Image (tube, grey):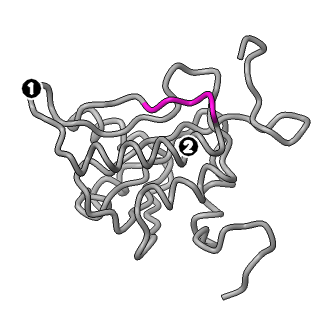
Amino acid sequence: MGLLKGIDPLLTADLLWVLRSMGHGDKICICDCNFPAYQVSTQTTSQKLVSLSSVSLPVAIDAIVGVLPLDHFVQHPARIMSPSPGMALPSEAVQVKAETQSSITKHAPAVVLSTLDRFDFYDEARTCFAIVQTSERRPYGNIILQKGVIGPDGTDLMPSSL
C-alpha cells in the first residue's frame, strides 16, 4: 500500500475512485456497521460498496469531506439518519451526530446536518452513487452527502449569498 502526500491514509484507492467518479449532485452514503450496506449497494448507481474497517463515522467524514466538495446550492447537502417519527434519539446517536457535525464544520463551515427518518434514509441511500461502510457501532451513524463543485480557486463553489 502506498501513501500520497496531502491525502488522508483512510482514503483507500477504491474510495478515492468513488469520490473522483462522482459528479456534481451525486450522493454518497457513509454508514455504520449495522446498516444493510451490501443489499443497498446493489441498487446504487455504481453498485459499489467500500469498507473502511476500524473507522468511526466522524473520522470517516473528516477524511472524506476533506477532499469532497459539498453542494452548497442545495438546502441539505448532509443528511443524517434519525429514528422514525415518535421514537427517541438514543444518547449515543446524539453523540455521533454532534461529532459528525464537528467533522463537517471543519471543512464546510456553512453546512449544517439535517435529519432524514430511518425508512426515508434507506430509500434515499438506494439512489446514491455508492455506499461506504464504517465500523461505527453507535446507532444512527449513517449520513448521505451530496457532492458539490470545486471552483476555479480550488475551494468549494458557493452561492454569492453565502
Give, as a single range, the part of the protein colored magenta: 109-113
Category of crowding for the residue at label 2, using alpha-carbon neighbours closer than 10 angstroms: few (below 14), some (14–19), many (at least 20)? many
Q: CA distance from mark 2 to mark 1?
A: 27 Å
Amino acid type, residue under disc 2 in the picture: Ile
Residue 152 in the image: state x and y as whole percent.
Answer: 90, 35
Quadrant of residue 37 in the image? bottom left
The question of residue 112 being in magenta is answered with: yes
- The residue that disc 2 covers is 104
Q: Which mark is residue 86?
A: 1
Amino acid type, residue under disc 1 in the picture: Gly
Quadrant of residue 125 in the image? top left
The question of residue 49 being in magenta is answered with: no
Residue 83 in the image: state x and y as whole percent.
Answer: 18, 36
Which residue shows up at 63% across the image and 34% down it? 109
Q: Main secondary structure of the magenta part?
A: loop
Compared with residue 79, is residue 66 higher up or lower down, i.e. above or below? below
Which residue shows up at 63% across the image and 72% down it? 13
User: In the image as oriented, which residue stretches furthest toward the right?
Assistant: 153
Which residue shows up at 61% across the image and 39% down it? 147
| Quarter of the C terminus within the rendering | top right
Q: Are marks 2 and 1 in contact (CB under 8 Å)?
A: no
Compared with residue 68, is residue 39 higher up or lower down, i.e. above or below? below
